[in-house]
C-alpha cells in the first residue's frame, strides 16, 4: 500500500498540471469551503437588524442555505447539459472566481437579498469548480494510477478540511467574520489566482 501511495505521489510531482489541481483542492479545503459553514454567523451577526428576533434570524439563515442550494443545483444542471472539453477551462476559472470573490465581498453586503445572490454564486462556483477538477483529473491520469491519485486529491480536499474548519472557526471567534472572510478570500485569490495566471495549462490539457 505504501509503495502504491508513493507511486501516486511521484506521478503528481512529475505531472505538475495534475499536482497543481491537488494544491488548489487543498487551498479550497483549508481556506475557502469552511467559510460556507459560517452561514449562521452571517445570518445572525453580519446581517443583524435592530428588529431581529430568533424567528427572523432563523428565516434569514434558511434563505441563505436555500440560495446556496439553488446555486449548486444550477451548476449541476448546467454541467450535465454541457460538459464538452471546449468549456472546461473557462468553467474552472469562473467557478473559482465566483467562490473566491464571493468570500471577499460578502462582508460588505448589508442586505439579505444581496447576500443571497452572493451565496448563490458561491454555491454555483463550489460545484462548478469541483466537478470540473474531478473531470480534469479523471481524464488526465492513467487508468493504472487513477485510484491512487484521486485518493490523494480527495484527501487534500476533504481530509484536511476539518483542520480548515477549526482554523476558520478560531479566526472568526478571534478576529470577527468580516476580517476572516476577507483574509481567507485574499489568500485563496493570491495562491489559486497565481496558479491560474502562471500555469494556465492546468485548465487546458484535456484536448
Image (cartoon, grey):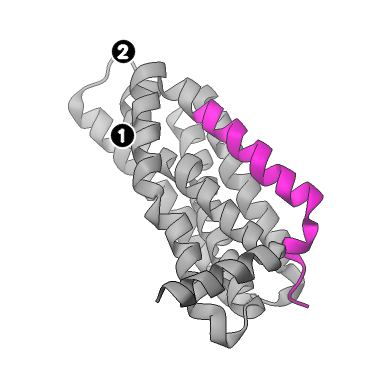
Q: Is residue 82 visible?
A: yes
- What residue is at 39 percent from the left and 33 percent from the top? 167
Residue 12: assigned label = none
> Does the segment drawn in magenta span residue 39?
no
- The quarter holding residue 19 reads bottom right
Give the crowd class for mark 2: few <14, some 14-19, many >=20 residues within 10 Å. few
Residue 158 picture location, percent across and down: 40, 56
Q: Is residue 21 left or right of residue 71?
A: right
Instruction: Say if 207 sits above or below 25 in the image.
Output: below
- Report, in whole angstroms, how far the alpha carbon at label 2 lies from the one at label 1: 17 Å
| Residue at image point 59% right, 39% down | 188
Q: Nearer the viewer, residue 65 or 59?
A: 65
Name the side, left or right, on which 144 lies relative to 5: right
Residue 204 magenta:
yes
Front residue of 120 and 39: 39
Residue 78 in sight in this render: no
Q: Nearer the viewer, mark 2 or mark 1?
A: 1
Quick check: 19 above or below 84? above
Residue beneath the point at 43% across and 49% down: 68
Q: Which residue is mark 1?
A: 40
The residue at the far left in this view is 54
Query: Tag 1 or tag 2, which sits nearer the N-term?
Result: 1
Residue, x 78% and y 55% (percent of image)? 199
In this picture, which residue range is highlighted in magenta?
181-207
Q: Residue 150: x, y in percent?
A: 50, 71
Query: Would you say the magenta stretch is mainly helix, strand or loop?
Result: helix
Q: Which residue is mark 2?
A: 50
Q: Secondary structure at mark 2?
A: loop
Q: Quadrant of the N terminus?
A: bottom left
**Residue 145, above or below 169:** below
Amino acid at each position: 500500500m505504501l509503495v502504491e501511495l508513493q507511486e501516486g505521489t511521484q506521478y503528481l510531482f512529475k505531472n505538475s498540471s495534475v499536482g497543481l489541481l491537488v494544491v488548489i483542492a487543498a487551498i479550497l479545503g483549508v481556506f475557502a469551503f469552511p467559510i460556507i459553514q459560517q452561514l449562521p454567523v452571517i445570518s445572525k451577526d453580519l446581517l443583524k437588524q435592530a428588529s431581529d428576533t430568533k424567528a427572523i434570524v432563523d428565516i434569514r439563515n434558511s434563505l441563505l442555505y436555500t440560495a446556496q442550494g439553488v446555486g449548486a443545483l444550477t451548476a449541476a444542471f448546467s454541467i450535465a447539459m454541457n460538459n464538452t472539453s471546449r468549456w472546461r477551462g473557462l468553467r474552472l476559472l469562473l467557478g473559482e472566481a465566483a467562490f473566491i470573490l464571493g468570500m471577499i465581498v460578502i462582508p460588505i453586503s448589508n442586505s439579505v437579498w444581496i447576500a443571497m445572490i452572493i451565496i448563490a454564486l458561491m454555491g454555483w462556483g463550489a460545484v462548478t469548480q469541483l466537478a470540473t477538477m474531478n473531470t480534469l483529473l479523471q481524464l488526465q491520469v492513467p487508468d493504472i494510477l487513477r485510484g491512487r491519485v484521486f485518493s490523494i486529491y480527495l484527501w487534500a480536499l476533504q481530509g484536511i478540511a476539518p483542520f480548515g474548519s477549526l482554523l476558520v472557526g478560531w479566526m472568526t471567534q478571534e478576529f470577527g467574520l468580516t476580517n476572516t472572510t476577507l483574509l481567507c478570500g485574499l489568500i485563496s485569490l493570491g495562491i489559486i489566482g497565481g496558479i491560474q495566471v502562471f500555469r494556465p495549462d492546468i485548465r487546458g490539457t484535456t484536448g
